[in-house]
Image (spheres, helix red, strand yellow):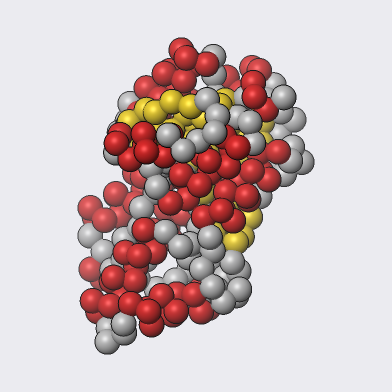
Amino acid sequence: MTGSRVCLVTGASQGIGAAIAHRLSSDGYRVALTARREEALHAVAARLPGENFVLAADVARPDAADHLLSAVEQRWGGVDVLVSNAGASTSAPLGRTTDEDWQRMLDLNLTAPFRLLRRAAPGMVQRGFGRVVVVASITSVVGSPYIAAYTASKHGVLGLVRSAAAELAGSGVTVNAVCPGYVDTPMTDASVERIVATTDRSPVQAREALARKQAIGRLVSVDEVAAAVSTCVTNAAITGAALPLGGDGSLA
């Protein structure tokens, strides 16, 4: 039964991560939540219906994966479901994308999921069960102007997912990516602010422009992303997938 399963959700202090933590808790899983902001994590945890605990950490740190997995193992015996959701974006023309921007996107969006997967996979294989879901982006499969560093990191993490899924197939461990377009989250709010600051559009017009970039003509909800993650967790036949949400619209 799901109540015996243990989940670790990164980037769980707000937005998509908070919604995923709530969905998995509602589904009967025990949920460990991590992000940098401990106070915000406790606020999310207080709303979860099931057993949970909070681990404040910066997943971009080299020692974070071992710290987090060891803490969960000590408390609950191991991680059965890893949801690598923590991420960030940056926007700049290619010629003004700095080395620091590039490295920050790789560290958080690609290297951190790799370290978490590397640390979690052996225990999952040993137990004969594991689910790894990376919250990637529609930019994992299409390109878009002004976000070269972000897009490269998301293309990379999809390659990681597909390679790991092929390697672990048959072991009881599945590895998938959920690839939403623009989601109604604080990250999208930041995109709206950038559009307003660099164009003559109002916040409403900027948000509508982002909605029109998607085939469904609206922003994806955090609950829709959480439902897709739940599907990857519950359906053992899905592995190596890049599950698109919202359609690519004019991002293609």
Up-down relation of residue 133 to residue 68 (above or below): below
Pick out the residue farthest to the bottom.
200
Q: Is residue 82 in view from this perspective?
A: no
Question: In the drawing, does residue 29 fall left or right of residue 208?
Answer: right
Image point 72% across, 24% down: which residue?
1
| 26 relative to 235 in the view: left or right | left
Question: Which is more toward the observer, 36 or 160?
Answer: 36
Hey, which quadrant is residue 26 in on the image? top right
Q: Position of residue 88 (x, y in %)?
A: 36, 53
In this rendering, position of residue 11 left or right of residue 235? left
State whether residue 18 appears in this view. yes
User: Which picture quadrant has residue 44?
Assistant: top left
Q: Nearer the viewer, residue 81 or 120?
A: 81
Q: Position of residue 191 (x, y in %)?
A: 34, 68
Question: Vertically, is 10 above or below 123?
Answer: below
Q: Position of residue 178 (x, y in %)?
A: 58, 52
Question: Residue 236 placed where, x, y %?
Answer: 74, 37
Q: Quadrant of residue 200?
A: bottom left
Number of labels in the image equals 0
Question: Dividing the image into 4 quarters, which one contains the C terminus?
Answer: bottom right
Q: Is residue 240 above or below residue 155?
A: above
Residue located 37% across and 22% down the image: 67
Q: Does 35 appear above or below 244?
A: above
At 56% from the left and 77% from the top, the residue drawn is: 217
Q: Residue at x 49, y 75 (%)?
A: 211
